[in-house]
Image (cartoon, grey):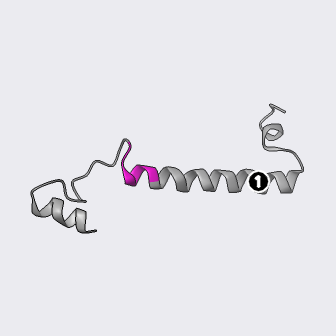
Amino acid sequence: MIAKLNLSLRGGMSEKNQPRFGFVNFAETWNGRLAMIGILIGLSTELLTGQGILGQIGLG
């Protein structure tokens, strides 16, 4: 928090001006969230169908 304030006071990039693509915190946060949702959906369908995740997509 203090580092962000120091950057904005020194004329650096503020949080609003930071890029939203590439290896930035915003992109990594959403990547993690979507990965967790994908794993949850895969495990849920595995419990419902009795097939493994690879079997559901025809690889197992």
From this view, report whether residue 27 is shown above or below residue 6: above
* Image: magenta residue range: 23-28
Q: Crowdedness of circle 1 by 10 Å Cα count: few (<14), some, many (20+)?
A: some
Residue 41 lies in the magenta stretch: no
From this view, report whether residue 23 is shown above or below residue 41: above
Looking at the image, residue 43 sits to the left or right of residue 5; the answer is right
| Prevailing secondary structure of the magenta residues | helix
From this view, report whether residue 45 is shown above or below residue 55: below
Residue drawn at x 21%, y 54% is: 17
- Give the image quarter of residue 16: bottom left
Residue drawn at x 78%, y 43% is: 53
Looking at the image, residue 37 sits to the left or right of residue 18; the answer is right
* Residue denoted by label 1: 43
Determine the secondary structure under disc 1.
Answer: helix
Looking at the image, residue 37 sits to the left or right of residue 4; the answer is right
x and y percentages locating residue 30 in the rendered image: 47, 54
Q: In the rendered picture of this protein, how many numbered marks are placed on residues?
A: 1
Residue drawn at x 84%, y 56% is: 47
